[in-house]
Image (cartoon, rainbow, N blue to C red):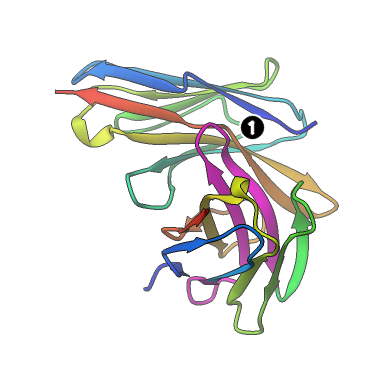
Amino acid sequence: GENVEQHPSTLSVQEGDSAVIKCTYSDSASNYFPWYKQELGKGPQLIIDIRSNVGEKKDQRIAVTLNKTAKHFSLHITETQPEDSAVYFCAAQLSTSGTYKYIFGTGTRLKVLA
Amino acid sequence: KAGVTQTPRYLIKTRGQQVTLSCSPISGHRSVSWYQQTPGQGLQFLFEYFSETQRNKGNFPGRFSGRQFSNSRSEMNVSTLELGDSALYLCASQGTVGTGELFFGEGSRLTVL
């Protein structure tokens, strides 16, 4: 069935180090992969996304890579800062009969230690 | 531009009761979707509405229902509450049909005792 696996569930890094979060999706028809950041007490917010015709996308300190063959995509955060501490969710979009829905991963709690 | 507004923010119910949650999307957004967030389960899709029509539904029992009004505001209802329904319920609106950004509200935290 439709599924997105996300690892790790928790990740602690020292300030300035890099963080990598990995996701695997099951439906090969998925073609859009957003990443959301959820800060404490708030709703998730889109931070970066990638479409299936692109292998990598960067936006300042964050980047996302996509391997369609392996059905893997990853979020990379470089030079981490305390404000990067949050829960991160990956998602894969499915299209069925002209409608769309998102399948989210289970989340990664990132802690950046000062 | 005002964001997505969800009410109430917090509520406590007892088993067997029902609850109605409300969501006002960003002005001009016609798509509203609902998600249940629980620790370890991430965000699980409940349903999506567009122009008052349910377009997609997740794998939740019939106790979970929703509707959308002509002004795009949406409500979801959970009847015969169970302890396992305790969760953060998030609403998201979308301005572009298809691969568009989801704008989430801050959620309604439901506790079932």
Residue at the spot x=68%, y=37% of the render? A31
Q: Nearer the viewer, residue A50 or A87?
A: A87
* B94 shown above or below A85: below
Around disc 1, counting alpha carbons within 10 Å, would you say few (fewer than 14), some (14 to 19), or many (20 or more)? Answer: few
Image location of residue A34, percent across then percent down: 53, 39
Q: Is residue A60 left or right of residue B41?
A: left
Q: Main secondary structure of the magenta part?
A: strand
Q: Is residue B79 left or right of residue A111?
A: right
Image location of residue B46, percent across then percent down: 68, 53
The furthest residue to the left: A114
Residue at the spot x=56%, y=60% of the render? B14
Q: Is residue B105 left or right of residue A16?
A: right
Identify the image quadrant of residue A60: top left
Residue at the spot x=50%, y=57% of the render? B110
Residue type at tag 1 = Asn
Image location of residue A88, percent across then percent down: 43, 34
Q: Is residue A44 magenta?
A: no
Residue at the spot x=60%, y=48% of the render? B83
* B45 shown above or below A112: below
Q: Callout 1: residue from which chain?
A: A
Q: Nearer the viewer, residue B55 or A12?
A: A12
Q: How many marks?
A: 1
Image location of residue B88, percent across then percent down: 50, 51
Numbered disc 1: secondary structure: loop
Residue hosting label 1:
A53
Q: Is residue B38 magenta?
A: yes
Q: Which residues are magenta?
A: B23-50
